[in-house]
Image (cartoon, rainbow, N blue to C red):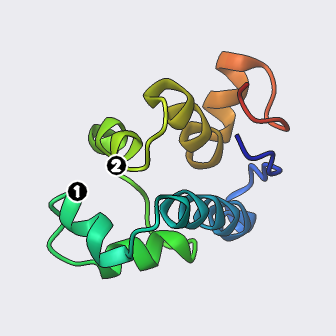
C-alpha cells in the first residue's frame, strides 16, 4: 500500500484526494490499461470519471468499492481501507486509531 499523509479538514480536502488520485492512477497504470479500458471494465458511461478521480476530483461510490478493487487487482478490504482513510479520515481514525499510516 502507498503511505500517503492524511489531512482531515474540509479546507484541505483536495490535497488528500489528489494523493489518492495519484495512487489510483498508479494502480491502473500497473495493470497497463487506459482510463477508457478501466471505465469499460467498470461499466462506466464516461471514462472522464476516471480522469476526475485521478486528479483528485470526485469520489468512488461506496457501493462500487469491491468492483474497483477487483478491476485494479487489489484485495477489497485493503483497498476499502485506503479509500476510507482519504474519504472519511475521522471515521478511519475512530475505527483504526491511526490516520497517518496506510493499512498493512
Q: Earlier in the sequence, mark 1 or mark 2?
A: 1
Q: Position of residue 100 (x, y in %)?
A: 85, 38
**Residue 18 location, quadrant:** bottom right
Seen as rendered, the residue at the extreme front is 32
**Residue 38 location, quadrant:** bottom left
Q: Secondary structure at mark 2?
A: helix
Closer to the camera in the image, 49 or 11: 49
Q: Are marks 1 and 2 in contact (CB under 8 Å)?
A: yes
Q: Label 1 to label 2, Cα distance in Å? A: 7 Å
State which quarter of the image contains the N terminus: top right
Q: Position of residue 24 (x, y in %)?
A: 55, 59
Which residue, given by chain and number where applicable, does mark 1 sit on?
A: 42
Residue 103, disc: none
Q: Position of residue 73 (x, y in %)?
A: 44, 42
Look at 58% across and 31% down and name the residue there. 81
13 relative to 81 in the view: left or right: right
Residue 71, disc: 2
Q: Position of residue 95 (x, y in %)?
A: 65, 17
Q: Is residue 86 above or below residue 43?
A: above
Look at 49% across and 24% down and name the residue there. 77
Closer to the camera in the image, 70 or 84: 70
Amino acid at each position: 500500500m502507498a503511505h500517503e499523509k492524511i489531512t482531515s479538514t474540509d479546507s484541505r480536502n483536495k490535497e488528500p484526494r489528489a494523493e489518492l488520485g495519484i495512487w489510483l492512477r498508479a494502480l491502473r497504470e500497473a495493470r497497463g490499461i487506459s482510463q477508457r479500458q478501466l471505465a469499460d471494465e467498470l461499466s462506466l458511461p464516461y471514462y472522464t470519471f476516471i480522469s476526475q478521480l485521478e486528479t483528485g476530483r470526485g469520489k468512488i461510490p461506496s457501493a462500487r468499492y469491491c468492483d474497483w478493487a477487483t478491476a485494479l487487482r487489489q484485495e477489497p478490504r485493503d483497498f476499502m481501507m485506503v479509500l476510507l482513510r482519504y474519504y472519511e479520515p475521522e471515521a478511519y481514525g475512530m475505527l483504526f486509531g491511526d490516520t497517518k499510516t496506510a493499512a498493512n
